[in-house]
Image (cartoon, helix red, strand yellow):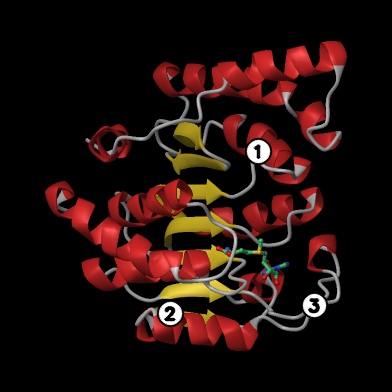
C-alpha cells in the first residue's frame, strides 16, 4: 500500500461510511480502513457483526481500491439476537444492509454470509488478514468469536475489536485476557473504543512486545470493574476510573507511524 495515496482513499471511504447508518465514529472508521489496507498479511477481511453496513462499507471500499478481495460480512440480521440484548425486538437489518452497500457502490466487494459467526466458523478454512469483531458483545460470545477465528489469522494479520472501551465489559475482558495476555500477539493498542493487536506467533513473546502488552493490560484491567458497573462511578471510584483511563493510551493514530509499527521486517 502506498501511504501517500491513503489519505484521499480514506477521505473518500469516510464520505461513503458517513452516509451509512450504524455504530462507528469517524476516527474509528478511519482506523479500521487503515488496518484493512496496511495489514502486512494475505488473506480475507472478515467482519463479524455488520448491522446496517457502516463498518462493512469502509472495509469494502478499501478492499475494492487495493484489490484485497471481497469482505466477508457475517451477520444473521435476525432480531432479537439470542445473546445480544441490545438488539431488542427490532426488525431485521438485512434490507437496509443491502441498500447501504448498493448506495455506497461496494455491493460487489462484499461476500454476505447471513448467519451466526459460529455457523460460518464450522466450514471456515481461509487465512484472514483482518478480523473485525463487532457482533454479539456478551463476554462468552466475544470470547467464542475470537477462539473460533483466531486459528485462521495469518501471521502479521490485524485483529480489531469494537467497544473494548465502550459500554460493554465483555469485549474489554476478552481483549485484556485473551489478546494482551497472549504471546501470539505482538504490537497492540487501543484507539477510541477499538482494541487492536497484530498476530505475531513467531515473535510475539519478544520483550519489546510483551512489555507493552503487559503495561496496557495492567491499566485496562483496572477498567473492567468500571465497565461492569456501566461506567457509572461516584466519589473515589470516579477518581480511580479517571486516573486509569488517562493512563490508557487510546488517542491519535498517525497512519505512517502505525503502518511502520506493524510492518514485518
Ligand atoms: C453493534 S452491531 C454491528 C455494528 C456494525 N459493525 C456497524 O458498523 O454499524 C452488532 C451486530 O452483530 C450481529 N450479531 C449478533 N450476534 C452475532 C453472531 N453470533 N454472529 C454474527 N453477527 C452477530 C447483530 O445482528 C448486529 O447486527
Q: Position of residue 19 (x, y in %)?
A: 45, 71
Residue wearing tag 2: 110
Residue wearing tag 1: 178
Secondary element under disc 2, as helix, strand or loop, is strand
Task: Find out whether the residues at labels 1 and 2 contact each other: C-beta distance under 8 Å.
Answer: no
Q: Earlier in the sequence, mark 2 or mark 3?
A: 3
Residue wearing tag 3: 90
Q: Quadrant of the N terminus?
A: bottom left
Q: Earlier in the sequence, mark 3 or mark 1?
A: 3
214 vs 201, nearest the viewer:
214
Relative placement, left or right, of 92 versus 28 is right
Would residue 44 be visible to someone looking at this image?
no
Q: Position of residue 255 (x, y in %)?
A: 28, 40
Q: Position of residue 52 (x, y in %)?
A: 58, 74
User: How far apart are the alpha carbons under marks 3 and 1?
Assistant: 32 Å
Q: Earlier in the sequence, mark 1 or mark 2?
A: 2
Above/below status of 221 relative to 263: above
Residue 96: which quarter of the image? Answer: bottom right
Secondary element under disc 1, as helix, strand or loop, is helix
Amino acid at each position: 500500500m502506498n501511504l501517500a495515496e491513503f489519505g484521499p482513499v480514506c477521505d473518500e471511504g469516510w464520505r461513503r461510511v458517513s452516509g451509512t447508518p450504524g455504530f462507528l465514529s469517524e476516527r474509528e472508521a478511519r482506523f479500521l480502513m487503515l488496518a484493512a489496507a496496511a495489514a502486512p498479511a494475505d488473506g480475507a477481511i472478515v467482519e463479524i457483526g455488520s448491522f446496517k453496513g457502516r463498518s462493512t462499507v469502509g472495509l469494502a471500499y478499501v478492499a475494492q481500491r487495493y484489490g484485497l478481495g471481497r469482505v466477508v460480512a457475517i451477520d444473521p440480521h435476525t432480531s432479537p439476537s439470542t445473546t445480544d440484548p441490545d438488539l431488542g425486538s427490532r426488525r431485521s437489518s438485512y434490507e437496509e444492509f443491502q441498500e447501504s452497500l448498493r448506495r455506497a457502490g461496494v455491493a460487489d466487494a462484499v461476500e454476505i454470509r447471513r448467519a451466526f459467526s459460529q455457523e460460518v466458523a464450522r466450514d471456515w478454512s481461509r487465512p484472514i488478514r483482518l478480523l473485525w469483531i463487532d457482533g454479539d458483545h456478551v463476554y462468552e460470545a466475544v470470547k467464542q468469536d475470537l477462539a473460533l477465528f483466531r486459528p485462521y489469522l495469518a501471521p502479521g494479520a490485524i485483529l480489531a475489536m469494537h467497544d473494548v472501551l465502550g459500554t460493554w465489559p465483555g469485549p474489554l475482558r476478552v481483549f485484556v485476557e485473551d489478546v494482551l495476555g497472549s504471546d501470539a500477539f505482538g504490537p497492540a493498542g487501543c484507539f477510541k473504543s477499538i482494541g487492536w493487536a497484530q498476530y505475531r506467533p513467531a515473535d510475539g513473546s519478544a520483550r519489546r512486545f510483551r512489555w507493552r502488552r503487559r503495561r496496557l493490560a495492567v491499566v485496562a484491567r483496572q477498567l473492567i470493574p468500571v465497565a461492569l458497573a456501566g461506567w457509572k462511578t461516584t466519589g473515589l471510584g470516579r477518581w480511580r476510573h479517571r486516573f486509569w483511563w488517562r493512563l490508557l493510551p487510546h488517542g491519535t493514530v498517525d497512519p505512517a507511524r502505525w503502518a511502520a509499527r506493524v510492518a514485518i521486517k
